[in-house]
Image (cartoon, helix red, strand yellow):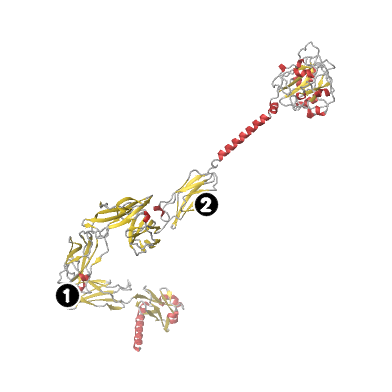
Amino acid sequence: MTMVLARRLLLFALACLASASSSAETGSHLVITPQSPVLQIGTNFTATCVIIGTTEVTADDLYWNLSQIVIPSNQYTKINESALSVTIPVDNEESEWLFCHCKEKSSYVFFNKGKFIHGIHLTKVYPPEKPKNLTCIVVQGVHYMSKDFKCSWEPPEHHIKEMPTTYTLHVEAIQNNQAYNVSTQKNTATVTMEVFLFHLDLEIWVVADNQLGTVESEHLKQEATSFAKTNPPSSVEVFSEESFPTSLLINWKHPIPKQKIVLKYQIRYCLNGSHNWISVPMVLITKEAESFRLQNLQPDTVYTTQVRCKHANKGYGYWSNWSANVTEKTHAYRPTSKPDLWNIITERVNERQVKFICKNPVLSNGKITGFKIKIQTRKDDMMNRNMSWENIPVKEPEVDSFRSHKFTVLKQMTLPDNISARVYVTAINSAGESPQASIGIPERALDRDPVEGFKVHPQGDTFFLKWNPPNNSAVTQYVVQWVSANDMDWQRESKTTQQTTIKGNIEKFICYNISVYPIYSGWTGKPARVEAFLEERAPLVGPSVRLNGKPGRNQAKLVWNEIPQHEQQGFITNYTIFYSSGSKRSITVPATVTSYVLTSLSANTKYDAWIRASTNGGSTDGTKHSFTTLEYAPGDIEMIVVGVSLGFLFVVLLTMLLCIYKKDVIRKNLWPWIPNPRKSTIRNWSPDYPLKPETPKENFLSGICVLDVDVSDGKSVSEEDKTSLALKKDKYLSEEHSSGIGGSSCMSSPRQSVSDSDEGADIADTTASTVQYSSVVASNGYKGQTPSAQPQQLIFSRSESTQPLLDSEENPDLLVQEGSGASQPFSQVPCFSHSAWNQDNGSFPELNQLEVEPQEVLLQLDMCPSGEDSEQKTLADGQSLSSYMPQLGGYRPQ
């Protein structure tokens, strides 16, 4: 221990001297020892900073810096007043700089900073690792072994590119002391010898060296040929013999003379195109053998064979590469297994359509050129035994609408329900005929029970099937069949099987109809079927929706077709109907529904509708369809038209009935009757005796009105041609009893009567388009006409016409002025309606009640032809009114 400490102090002293000399040369007051060290990664490193040539600073003023980071003071060790050490871990592979600094405690230090700093470069490496798994090999050339001896070993676990490790390979012949070596920085090296040293023992090792030390690998001591790798066997040939259809003979030659190296061989073979190699046990192949016979092969099958070799000593040498592929076909032999016979049954009414198909025998032992088939049918326990064998040639296996699996369609037939059939089939190749296969189809009424509890579940890339056997224990085997849109296949299971997996190629997103058929001693039983998907996803396309007919006012019927099965990619769980006219609404219906009636739609509105089909794996929307609802529902317009028409017809009929019922009233108001003046005799009429009026009673005056007639004294009138007679209402009559001529009461309709100027002006304002008037005038002429020489008489004038009145009639004042020029006193003249006429006694009863003088009276005529001029009638004094009434032209009392 004392020696170690003394050695360290000596080294420290020497380092200080070296540093002092170096510092003296550079003028620095700080020196670090050791200088430029090489550090081992994973250890601790201690450096010391020494102050020389100054007393301005002490060890307490020093501090350390590693890669510009100040090292904590707890890693410092003060050796004395002029030396300070630091200890740091070496824990990474990067090279770094370590500096010793001094604090700026004085102006001298401040102005001489360069003299108070010193640093060293730290180089980090791993120690050399021992080379492991040293192996060497010598490869054969064209005829002889190569002179190059190539060795390799595992690369080191840790490697620093800046400080590599040097490896030296040593190869030495023990018997003759021949030595070869080569150095490298890689993990492989090749030594070139003068000649290959056959039958000599060699010693081989590797030395690893770097700045931290040296280490050697394990030494290999083996015979030289144990490192040899020869070429593959040459001239490999394979022969097929007709007498041995299940074997092939292989011959080859040694790649190197057996005097130099003793070799052993290995053989492997496989079906042509396959990579499932079958190796021949090496114990069956003798050393230095140059032939071998492969046995238990399939007849009429092409095989590929390969051979390789290596040093015969156990544990030595390397296997050569495999020889090139050599193919050969075994000779044909008759089929040794039955054809796989099956049937496809399509049930119809009272019959079945049967298609018999089969696969080639598994051990066909040659190309199948045809099949022989025989069908026996049975009806009512009577078997048809006259059926002969029928040869069916096979050119190429038919696909029969399926892509994945090939089979041969043997025969199709129609089988009535009450007939059973049994089919026998054999396969034929160039060497013979296979064993016989058979299958039976019973009568439909005798179908055997199916399996129970049949379930199917996806399992990886196939389906897992499970079932319970039927109650009948006579089951001899089961047939599992799976059918898709583009595929059909089947497999057979033993009678004890209750669960299995489908061994065929199953695709995702395809619907498979999977069936299990129990077979009863060759007779087919009823199947149990399940549809399944290996994996589901959204349908490829959505339903295409359309309208069924035309949309209504508030409803529309949508229809769509089911998505084709090969595009469903899963079981359709439901359809969702979307329709929108600004706001989107939806309705979900079951998968079995393919039509739906949308209700509560708005009239005269455009809608967009589409259908979404959903599976357990997703949903897909179909194409949109637009439609516009009607403004009126079908039949609304017809109902409106019919209603309006019926209403109009009702109004017309009601109007017609009303017109018929009120025809007299309508005729009186629309077409008043004006007597024909030309046929009237009123001008020859005059009263010849005075009336004997009676005291009128109020209830007898409804048909009488009194007119005031302006006449001259007694029986004379003015001598002028045109005189005017003013009329005035009598005091006995009230306004409500006034009526115009032609009405049922006197002055009931507006008219203008000849009266004094005041009253005439008031009444003229209310005159309607039909002017009815009556007056009594003097008989000395009309409008300036010369009267006759007969005695002067009063004139009774009446008119009811749509023509305007004459000037003398409208303005009686003018008529008076044209006459005598002086107003005359008024007389009251009664006016009667025709309704007051009594046909039995030919008189007006009311007239006798009036106390009037026998003078002119006015008669109101209700019905006169319109459009005819009025005429004048003269009533003589004392003439009875009853004597006048029969003379009225065209008058008929109503």
Q: Residue at x 27, y 64 (%)?
A: 276
Against 418, is 191 above or below? below
Toward the front, the furthest residue is 381
Q: Residue at x 35, y 52 (%)?
A: 418
Residue 285 or residue 718, whichever sits in front: 285
Residue matched to label 2: 585
Residue 711 or residue 741, whichever sits in front: 741
Task: Tell me which amino acid carries mark 2.
Answer: Arg
Question: On the rendered structure, is 453 left or right of 359?
Answer: right
Label number found at residue 254: none
Task: Tell me which amino acid carries mark 1.
Answer: His
Dot 2 falls on a residue whose secondary structure is: strand
Residue matched to label 1: 199
Question: On the rendered structure, is 805 left or right of 207?
Answer: right
Residue 13 or residue 251, whichever sits in front: 251
- Location of residue 319 (image quadrant): bottom left
The image shows residue 383 at horizontal and vertical percentages of: 30, 53
| Crowding near the residue tagged with mark 1, few <14, some 14–19, many ≥20 C-alpha atoms within 10 Å | few
The image shows residue 289 at horizontal and vertical percentages of: 17, 69
Against 101, is 457 above or below? above
Toward the top, the furthest residue is 789
Against 880, is 43 above or below? below
Which sits earlier in the primary sequence, circle 2 or circle 1? 1
Which quadrant holds the C terminus?
Answer: top right
Dot 1 falls on a residue whose secondary structure is: loop
The image shows residue 343 at horizontal and vertical percentages of: 32, 55
Give the number of the mark in front: 2 or 1.
2
Toward the bottom, the furthest residue is 2
